[in-house]
Amino acid sequence: MTDTPKNSDLMPDIHTRVTQALTHIFLQISSRTDLKPTLGIILGSGLGGFASQVENAVVIPYSEIPNFPRSTVEGHEGKLVIGTISGVPVAVMQGRVHAYEGYSMSEVTFPMRVLGMLGCKALIVTNAAGGINKSYAQGGLVCISDHINLTGQNAAIGSNDARFAIRPGAGLRFFDMTTAYSPRLRKLAAEEAAKQNIPLPEGVYLAVLGPSYETAAEIRAFRTLGADLVGMSTVHEVIIARHMGVEVLGLSLVTNMAAGVLDQPIHHAEVMETGLRVEAQFTSLVKALVPQVSAAVA
Ligand code: HPA
């Protein structure tokens, strides 16, 4: 008797699926020889408007890219925007998918793998986060110095595929996370923010699965653990970026103070509104950082 094939036997491996996505993307940008993205940008909730900064953009809906996951959350557009910012070729993900939508770790990090294999040596990853640190204010930006992954999942689980390494020494089974958030890119961000008079404290981002927001007791516990920010994304993308050898700059927008910090409930609408309110500041900072980050990793 023959065995019925398992799903995993029928499904091509992640590298093959990423290659299929890349083939589609390269076809879309094939007439644009200037477009070899070296910098990837992932836009978090309420920050998708930044994609309008991309010049001469080729816009590819996620729904058209083979194997690309589709966002089901309001505020996440679902488009890959490839073009230039200040002359730097960039690939901007307007919207991401999250584990709480029911996506597996390999689906959540699929776009990150595509960005890396497209040629992005650096990633600017952004998100909406709750502020645990009481010195933060709603609407403030924070540069992520480190993370605590409390999602109970790790996107690098599975057979190690060294073909995803974009730099010598990357693609290892066990890889370093001590400087996951690049010290030299954080320094550039701090200097640019100071120049623009934008407060940019550093903070530790703690990731939970969601989709429920946290309880007040959880936030007190997370503060004791050393967390300044809480959110439901980013850490998995950063893990995969570091596996590939991509250098990471992480920026959080404090869309709300975390549960129990203020005497009020948290609403997703608030998260979105805050994004729109600070869009100009966020845009000005990130836009100025694009050529600097690109030059640093060249
Ligand atoms: N908790 C978790 N994720 C979030 C929050 C929060 O308070 N705000 C924005 N994303």
Image: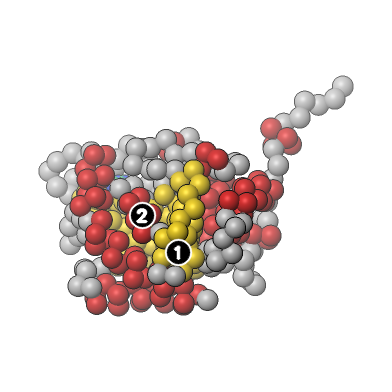
Q: Is residue 61 left or right of residue 287?
A: right
Is 258 situated left or right of 64 in this image?
Answer: left
250 versus 69 height, above or below: below
User: Which residue, as the protein is rendered here, is positioned at the far right?
Assistant: 1
Please tell me whether residue 270 is drawn above or below residue 83 in the rendered image: above
Earlier in the chain: of badge 1 and badge 2, it is 2
Secondary structure of the residue carrying numbered label 1: strand
Residue 189 visible in rendering = yes
Image-quadrant location for residue 120: bottom right
User: Where in the figure is residue 285, as x and y percent of width and height?
Assistant: 30, 67
The residue positioned 17% from the left and 57% from the top of the image is: 137
Disc 2 marks which residue?
A: 52
Q: Residue at x 66, y 47 (%)?
A: 20
Dot label at residue 203? none
Location of residue 229 (image quadrant):
bottom left
Q: Could you classify mark 2 by the number of other residues whose Cα lies within 10 Å: few (under 14), some (14-19), or many (20 or more)?
A: few
Q: Is residue 7 left or right of residue 142?
A: right
Residue at the spot 33% in from the left edge and 42% down from the top edge: 75
In the picture of the structure, the residue carrying the numbered disc 1 is 84
Report the amino acid beneath label 2.
Answer: Ser
Q: Can see residue 226? A: no
Q: Nearer the viewer, residue 102 or 73?
A: 73
Q: Give residue 169's position: percent from left, percent from top.
A: 64, 71
**Based on the displayed image, in which of its 4 quarters is residue 195 positioned?**
bottom left
